[in-house]
Structure formats: structure tokens, C-alpha cells
Amino acid sequence: MDIEIVKKIEELKRKRKAVILAHFYQSPEVQDIADFVGDSLELSRKARDAEGETIVFCGVWFMAETAKVLCPQKTVLLPEQNAGCPMADMVTPDDVHRLRAEHPGAAVVCYVNSSAGIKACSDICCTSSNAVAVVKSLKESEIIFVPDQNLGHYVSTQVPDKRFILHSGFCPTHHRISPDDITAARAAHPNALVLVHPECPPGVVSQADFTGSTAQILDYATKSEQTAFIIGTEDGILYRLGKQNPGKQFYPLGGSMVCSNMKKTSLESVYRSLKDMQYQMELDKETISKAAVCLNRMFSVS
């Protein structure tokens, strides 16, 4: 940790009346300078309820967009302008409109890992923490789920009374994990439980001991009497798991699981962001208004 740059960030944070939010997938030093570290649902709530005038979002593009939708009066900064999300890029508003035309009676549920434009044309948003509860809350028996086919499939197994139309998107980091990786990990660590994210493929989820969001994985491992765990999600969570559970062992599933976009943010880019007030998230009023309806419907459920 560079003490001098941390001091500069703290000084600028006070000057800008800023709060720093960071996702669990960020690098350890970025997590350590954040005012709050969490998963997408927790970060959405913190952004909505944040005090001050500025939000520095250490994450990827759609997360900063979501913060701007929830706090249009605040300045929202994304330290790394090119920190995107391949999954979010896999669906467009035209895709949603086409699916609506093909299934006119269906509700459109969008994963939070999507653009503000997708949220603006969807009925309700969800995160991996609350997706099951969100879908159960809907009166419609047919669900269009975008963009993540793997999370959508997982939710469909938990809500079997509804019919799902799944978009073909996926998270490259989670999607490359295979059942063979679980077999190899169990052989290497026979006493460890396997905890995976629902963005993993169905064949991986079906062999896991527990499936949940990053926050749910953290909570499960912390409360469990077990002392060894194989973790099937982005490697950034390993830092928080180890920090909260110094007497337990955590092993990555399938070797290194790194999201290059999440790792773009550094102490230097957080400092530059506050110093130069870059990069500011801008959205038009109509998109903010429509996307806010989608997000607030989610909050009313969870």
C-alpha cells in the first residue's frame, strides 16, 4: 500500500465530499481504501443512500451507471473509463424489444449486470442475491431473463412453476469453469466445500455444495464450521474471505479466475479520478427515469 497516495485520496475525498464504493472483485488495495465494499445489491443500496456530493465507483461501467440512475443529483465517477463488462455488452435494447414481441405476455427481468438502457426497457432488475425473490414476486408465468443465461437457468431451477426465455449472454470469467474443474479441486482439497456463483454453468452449479452471490458466499463461509473452501467466483473475493476468516483456507476453483476489467482500477486511478473529477457518468433524463422504475421495483421486493 502506497501510504502517500492513500493520504492524498483521503484529502481529496474530504474536499470533494465523496464516498468510495468498491466491489469484492477489486484488488486488495482498492478494497482497503473504500468506504464500503460489497456485491452489486449492497453497492446499489449504498449508492442510493450515500451522503455527500460525489460517488467514486470502483467497479465497472454498469455499476457506475446504476449509481447515477439512483443518485442523479450526485456526481458519479468511474476511475477507469474503459472498465466495461462483456456480459452487459451481450444484450441490446433491440434484443429486449424483439423478445417482448415474441413473448407479449412475459415479464422482462434484467440482471443488474446490464446497461442503463437495458434497465430502461425492462420491467424489473435483479442481482444474484435477490433474483429468485424478484422472479417469485412477479404475477407473470413467463419470464424473459437477460442477459445471463447461467443465472437465468439457476433461477429457473428455484422457480419451476414459471417458464423462462433465456438470453444467450454470460460472464466469460465464470462461464469457462467446468465440472472437471470441480473434480480436480475436490481431489486436491478433499475436505473443502465447493462454493460457486450462479453465473457459473449449470453443470458446475449442480455439483457445488453451495451456490450464491459474492456476499452470500462470504456469509456462508464465515458462518460455516468448515475450515476449507473451494471458491468458484472471481479471485478478488479471496482477499475479503481471508481477511474475515483468518483461521480458514480458501482455494480458487479452476485456477486463476480474474476479471481483467475489475482489475483495471488502481490507487493511482482513484486518485486521478478525485483530483480531476474523471470520468463522470452522464445519462439522459428519460433513461434515468425509466431505469429508476426498474431498479426501485427491485428494491420494493428485497
Image (cartoon, rainbow, N blue to C red):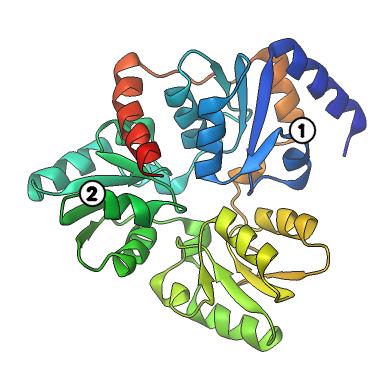
Q: Compared with residue 283, is residue 195 higher up or lower down, i.e. above or below?
A: below
Which callout, 2 or 1, points at the residue further toward the start of the chain?
Answer: 2
On residue 138, the disc is 2
Q: Could you classify mark 2 by the number of other residues whose Cα lies within 10 Å: few (under 14), some (14-19), or many (20 or more)?
A: some
Determine the residue positioned at 91% across, 32% down.
3
Residue 149 x %, y %:
33, 59
Q: Nearer the viewer, residue 17 or 233?
A: 17
Q: In which quarter of the image is the C terminus?
A: top left
Instruction: Estimate the x, y position of residue 123 in percent, counting from the top left.
Output: 24, 39
Q: Which mark is residue 32?
A: none
| Residues at circles 2 and 1 in contact by the CB criterion of under 8 Å | no
In this image, 31 relative to 287: left or right?
Answer: right
At a point 39% along the width and 72% down the height, the residue shown is: 202
Q: What residue type is labelled 1?
A: Leu
Q: In which quarter of the image is residue 29?
A: top right
2 vs 1, front mark: 2
**Residue 213 image offset from top left, x and y in percent:** 52, 57
Query: Going 40% across and 43% down the picture, which residue do you hit?
Result: 88
Residue 147 visible to an observer of this rendering: no
Tell me: residue 208, above or below residue 183: above
**Picture coordinates of residue 50, whole percent (x, y):** 58, 24
Query: Extreme right residue here?
Result: 3
Q: Viewed as shown, does residue 67 lie left or right of 255?
A: left
Q: Is mark 1 on a helix, strand or loop?
A: helix
Q: Quadrant of the N terminus?
A: top right
User: Label 2 amino acid?
Assistant: Leu
Residue 205, can we see it?
A: yes
Which residue is under mark 1? 267
Mark 1 neighbour class, 10 Å CA radius: few under 14, some 14 to 19, many 20 or more: many
